[in-house]
Image (spheres, rainbow, N blue to C red):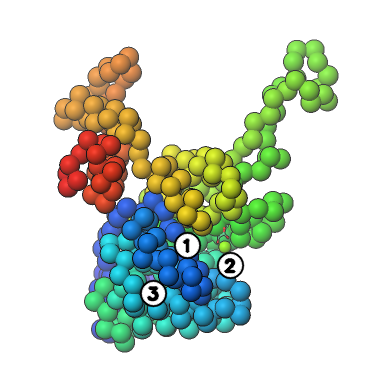
């Protein structure tokens, strides 16, 4: 057992103090780029201002033969490219891979002062986070970093989902979680063969018409269901309980921006703050979905104003508003205000001054 008093002490002599609160910064999209590819590194200065988070990916998607080049490319970007107030993250290889230790050592020692978050894939339980936590503290002390690097875990194994609450609470460094539907589907032995999104076979069907043969399919509409509903809802509860941020992960069908938008919106409505963008076309989708709609913000502002001190109940446009609905409205308006600080187009769509 660990005393609560020790929880906020550095895990290595000379390491920076752990954070007490996870900073809530605009995080609508985590945009992935492959740092091993020179052409992609060259695009970083142009892409960075268009995204909230830029992530150099060292894990899946990078061939084994390019792992070292990806690490070196990430170090080059972290050292030489000024990405302003866009967050810089990196996804390292998994804890059971031959690359993890060198990935973390190189990133913290070489570019630790510029790196906000390390994304750790395939996290299975709190013991994985404890290992990363101590290792980061040792490396931060050695590199004389002033700020601790935060940790974002991908939820992509059945054991990880079963341990999700303990993972979220394993360290003050825990910044958030992403759903990793591709690895999770494989690990759970789901029978899908795609990266995220729904599946036409996962459905419910209308009852047969009165007196009709039940074994007939004709005339009975089907409704596709969301394969990820349970996991996202569970992830959101675990994150909120521990004051950290939930994200939807990848949507692999790049051409299908319509279904991508639907999947992102389900996650947004359930409480996620953002999703991954794997291609520039998904940046706009994430921006649209994870920024509250101006009409919704105007409605929420109206409810807040009409509710005065926020207690009691009123009727507005035929609907009952009370202490609980005003709290939902505050969530929307606070998010809009925080995004407006970074996104001036949004600020004017919301009718806020850029600094309100
Ligand atoms: C992401 O890493 C996934 O496996 O979906
Ligand atoms: Mg994965």
Q: Please name the residue shown 27% across and 18% down the image.
A: 316
Instruction: Name the residue tied to disc 3.
Output: 77
Asked whether the viewer can see residue 161, the reply is: no
- Left or right of residue 56, residue 24 in this image: left
**Which of the two residues, 78 or 245, is positioned nearer the viewer here?**
78
**In the rendered picture of this protein, how many numbered marks are placed on residues?**
3
| Numbered label attached to residue 61 | 2
Name the spot of residue 100 as percent of width and height, x first. 51, 78
Instruction: Name the residue tied to disc 1.
Output: 32
The correct choice, above or below, for 299 with respect to 200 in the image is: above
Name the spot of residue 349 as percent of width and height, x first. 28, 37
The correct choice, above or below, for 199 with respect to 278 in the image is: above
- Left or right of residue 176, residue 216 in this image: right
**Which of the two residues, 301 or 340, is positioned nearer the viewer here?**
340
Upstream in sequence: badge 3 or badge 2: 2
**Tags 2 and 1 touching, CB below 8 Å:** yes
Q: Quadrant of the C terminus?
A: top left
Quadrant in the picture for residue 15: bottom left
The correct choice, above or below, for 318 with respect to 292 in the image is: above
SS state under label 2: loop
SS state under label 3: helix
Q: CA distance from mark 3 to mark 2?
A: 19 Å
């Amino acid at each position: 057992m660990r005393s609560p008093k020790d929880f906020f002490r550095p895990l290595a002599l000379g390491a920076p103090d752990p954070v007490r609160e996870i900073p809530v910064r605009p995080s609508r999209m985590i945009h992935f780029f492959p740092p091993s590819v020179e052409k992609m590194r060259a695009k970083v200065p142009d892409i960075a201002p268009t995204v909230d988070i830029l992530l150099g990916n060292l894990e899946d998607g990078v061939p084994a033969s390019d792992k070292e080049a990806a690490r070196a490319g990430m170090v080059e970007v972290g050292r030489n490219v000024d990405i302003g107030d866009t967050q810089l993250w990196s996804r390292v290889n998994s804890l059971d891979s031959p690359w993890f230790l060198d990935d973390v050592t190189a990133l913290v020692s070489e570019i630790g002062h510029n790196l906000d978050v390390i994304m750790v894939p395939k996290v299975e339980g709190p013991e994985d986070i404890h290992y990363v936590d101590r290792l980061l503290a040792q490396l931060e002390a050695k590199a004389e970093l002033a700020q601790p690097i935060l940790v974002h875990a991908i939820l992509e194994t059945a054991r990880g989902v079963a341990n999700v609450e303990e993972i979220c609470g394993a360290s003050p460094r825990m910044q958030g979680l992403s759903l990793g539907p591709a690895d999770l589907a494989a690990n759970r032995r789901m029978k899908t063969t795609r990266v995220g999104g729904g599946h036409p076979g996962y459905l419910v069907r209308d009852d047969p018409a009165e007196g009709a043969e039940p074994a007939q399919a004709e005339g009975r509409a089907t409704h596709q269901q969301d394969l990820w509903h349970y996991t996202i809802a569970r992830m959101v509860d675990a994150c909120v309980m521990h004051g950290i941020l939930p994200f939807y992960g990848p949507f692999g069908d790049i051409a299908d921006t319509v279904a991508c938008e639907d999947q992102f919106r389900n996650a947004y409505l359930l409480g996620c703050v953002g999703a991954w963008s794997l291609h520039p076309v998904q940046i706009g989708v994430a921006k649209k979905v994870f920024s509250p709609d101006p009409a919704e913000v105007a409605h929420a502002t109206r409810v807040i104003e009409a509710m005065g001190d926020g207690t009691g109940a009123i009727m507005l446009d035929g609907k009952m508003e009370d202490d609980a609905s005003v709290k939902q409205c505050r969530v929307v308006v606070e998010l809009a205000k925080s995004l407006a600080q970074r996104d001036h187009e949004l600020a004017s769509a919301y009718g806020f001054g850029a600094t309100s």
